[in-house]
Amino acid sequence: MPSREDIACRCGCGFAAFDWELKFILEHVAHQFGTSATVTSGCRCRARNEREKGSKNSYHLRGMAVDFFVPGISVEDVYAFLCFSFPEKYEIIIYDTIVHVAIQDSPERIDFRSKKVGV
Ligand SMILES: [Zn+2]
Ligand SMILES: [Zn+2]
Protein backbone atom coordinates (compact mmCIF):
# COMPACT_ATOMS: atom_id res chain seq x y z
CA MET A 1 0.00 0.00 0.00
CA PRO A 2 1.44 3.42 -0.86
CA SER A 3 2.14 5.52 2.21
CA ARG A 4 0.79 9.01 2.76
CA GLU A 5 4.27 10.43 2.02
CA ASP A 6 4.35 8.55 -1.29
CA ILE A 7 1.23 10.16 -2.63
CA ALA A 8 1.27 13.57 -0.90
CA CYS A 9 2.13 16.72 -2.83
CA ARG A 10 5.92 16.92 -3.07
CA CYS A 11 6.06 20.60 -2.12
CA GLY A 12 5.24 19.78 1.48
CA CYS A 13 1.91 21.64 1.53
CA GLY A 14 0.17 18.60 3.01
CA PHE A 15 -2.26 17.96 0.15
CA ALA A 16 -2.75 14.20 0.12
CA ALA A 17 -6.36 13.49 -0.85
CA PHE A 18 -5.72 10.44 -2.97
CA ASP A 19 -8.46 8.54 -4.77
CA TRP A 20 -8.91 5.06 -3.29
CA GLU A 21 -9.11 3.61 -6.78
CA LEU A 22 -5.52 4.65 -7.44
CA LYS A 23 -4.44 2.79 -4.32
CA PHE A 24 -6.22 -0.26 -5.66
CA ILE A 25 -4.42 0.08 -9.01
CA LEU A 26 -1.03 0.37 -7.31
CA GLU A 27 -1.84 -2.70 -5.20
CA HIS A 28 -2.83 -4.59 -8.30
CA VAL A 29 0.46 -3.68 -9.99
CA ALA A 30 2.51 -4.58 -6.91
CA HIS A 31 0.75 -7.94 -6.73
CA GLN A 32 1.44 -8.70 -10.38
CA PHE A 33 5.12 -7.81 -10.36
CA GLY A 34 5.90 -8.84 -6.81
CA THR A 35 7.34 -5.46 -5.91
CA SER A 36 5.92 -2.09 -4.93
CA ALA A 37 5.58 0.71 -7.43
CA THR A 38 7.67 3.82 -6.82
CA VAL A 39 5.42 6.87 -7.01
CA THR A 40 7.11 9.85 -8.66
CA SER A 41 4.08 12.13 -8.55
CA GLY A 42 0.71 11.76 -6.86
CA CYS A 43 -1.25 14.71 -5.52
CA ARG A 44 -0.21 18.18 -6.67
CA CYS A 45 -1.31 21.61 -5.50
CA ARG A 46 -1.48 24.34 -8.17
CA ALA A 47 2.01 25.66 -7.50
CA ARG A 48 3.54 22.21 -7.67
CA ASN A 49 1.62 21.33 -10.79
CA GLU A 50 3.01 24.40 -12.54
CA ARG A 51 6.52 23.48 -11.51
CA GLU A 52 6.03 19.97 -12.86
CA LYS A 53 4.56 21.46 -16.04
CA GLY A 54 1.32 19.57 -15.59
CA SER A 55 -1.69 20.52 -17.67
CA LYS A 56 -4.06 23.14 -16.23
CA ASN A 57 -6.78 20.60 -15.58
CA SER A 58 -4.44 17.85 -14.51
CA TYR A 59 -6.03 14.99 -12.63
CA HIS A 60 -3.12 15.30 -10.22
CA LEU A 61 -4.73 18.48 -8.86
CA ARG A 62 -7.66 16.44 -7.59
CA GLY A 63 -5.66 13.50 -6.32
CA MET A 64 -6.99 11.43 -9.19
CA ALA A 65 -3.75 10.62 -10.99
CA VAL A 66 -0.49 8.94 -10.19
CA ASP A 67 2.85 8.69 -11.98
CA PHE A 68 5.01 5.71 -11.11
CA PHE A 69 7.41 3.03 -12.22
CA VAL A 70 8.06 -0.46 -10.96
CA PRO A 71 11.75 -1.08 -10.14
CA GLY A 72 13.21 -3.73 -12.41
CA ILE A 73 10.20 -3.82 -14.73
CA SER A 74 10.07 -2.00 -18.07
CA VAL A 75 7.46 0.74 -18.47
CA GLU A 76 6.24 -1.15 -21.53
CA ASP A 77 5.43 -4.17 -19.39
CA VAL A 78 3.69 -2.06 -16.75
CA TYR A 79 1.72 -0.18 -19.39
CA ALA A 80 0.69 -3.38 -21.17
CA PHE A 81 -0.43 -4.90 -17.88
CA LEU A 82 -2.54 -1.85 -17.00
CA CYS A 83 -4.19 -1.78 -20.43
CA PHE A 84 -4.90 -5.49 -20.17
CA SER A 85 -6.29 -5.21 -16.63
CA PHE A 86 -8.50 -2.18 -17.21
CA PRO A 87 -9.58 -2.24 -20.86
CA GLU A 88 -12.64 -0.04 -20.36
CA LYS A 89 -11.46 2.84 -18.27
CA TYR A 90 -8.73 5.21 -17.12
CA GLU A 91 -6.39 7.55 -18.85
CA ILE A 92 -3.13 5.64 -19.18
CA ILE A 93 -0.07 7.39 -20.53
CA ILE A 94 3.29 5.80 -21.16
CA TYR A 95 6.41 7.98 -20.91
CA ASP A 96 10.05 6.94 -21.25
CA THR A 97 10.51 6.14 -17.58
CA ILE A 98 7.09 6.31 -15.92
CA VAL A 99 3.45 5.45 -16.45
CA HIS A 100 0.64 7.87 -15.62
CA VAL A 101 -2.80 6.60 -14.65
CA ALA A 102 -5.79 8.86 -14.04
CA ILE A 103 -9.26 7.98 -12.84
CA GLN A 104 -11.44 8.66 -15.84
CA ASP A 105 -14.55 6.76 -16.91
CA SER A 106 -13.63 6.39 -20.55
CA PRO A 107 -10.44 4.70 -21.72
CA GLU A 108 -7.72 6.89 -23.18
CA ARG A 109 -4.26 5.65 -24.15
CA ILE A 110 -1.40 7.97 -25.00
CA ASP A 111 2.18 7.24 -25.95
CA PHE A 112 4.54 10.08 -24.96
CA ARG A 113 7.73 8.10 -25.30
CA SER A 114 10.51 9.82 -27.22
CA LYS A 115 11.09 6.67 -29.26
CA LYS A 116 7.98 4.82 -30.15
CA VAL A 117 8.68 1.14 -30.20
CA GLY A 118 6.15 -1.63 -29.79
CA VAL A 119 4.16 -1.74 -26.57
ZN1 LIG B 1 1.77 21.37 -2.69
ZN1 LIG C 1 0.70 12.14 -14.29
Image: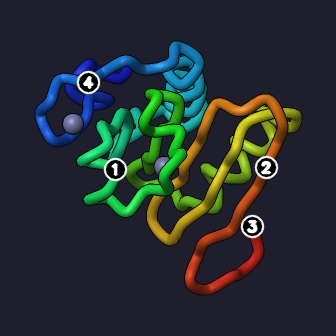
> Pointers 1 and 2 in contact (CB under 8 A)?
no
**Between 38 and 18, which is closer to the camera in this rendering?**
18
Kind of residue sitting beneath label 4 = Phe
The residue to which callout 1 is attached is 49
Determine whether the residue tagged by mark 4 lies in a helix, strand or loop: loop
Determine whether the residue tagged by mark 1 lies in a helix, strand or loop: helix
Estimate the spatial distance between the alpha carbons at disc 1 and disc 2, rounded to whole Å: 21 Å
Estimate the spatial distance between the alpha carbons at disc 3 and disc 4, rounded to whole Å: 34 Å
Residue found 59% across the figure and 75% down from its top: 113
Estimate the spatial distance between the alpha carbons at disc 4 and disc 2, rounded to whole Å: 26 Å
The residue to which callout 4 is attached is 15
Disc 2: residue Cβ within 8 A of ligand 2's nearest atom: no
Tell me where residue 34 appears, x and y as whole percent. 49, 32
Q: For the residue carrying disc 1, how many other residues have a C-alpha within 10 Å: few (<14), some (14-19), or many (20+)?
A: many
Disc 4: residue Cβ within 8 A of ligand 1's nearest atom: yes
Q: Closer to us: mark 1 or mark 3? A: 1
The residue to which callout 3 is attached is 119
Q: Is residue 69 left or right of residue 16?
A: right
Ranked by sequence position, the earlier of labels 3 and 4 is: 4
Residue found 30% across the figure and 21% down from its top: 16
Q: Closer to us: mark 3 or mark 4? A: 4
Estimate the spatial distance between the alpha carbons at disc 1 and disc 4, rounded to whole Å: 12 Å
Q: Residue furthest top?
A: 20
The residue to which callout 2 is attached is 108
Residue found 36% across the figure and 33% down from its top: 43
Ranked by sequence position, the earlier of labels 4 and 2 is: 4
Tell me where residue 22 appears, x and y as whole percent. 54, 25
Ranked by sequence position, the earlier of labels 2 and 3 is: 2
Kind of residue sitting beneath label 2 = Glu
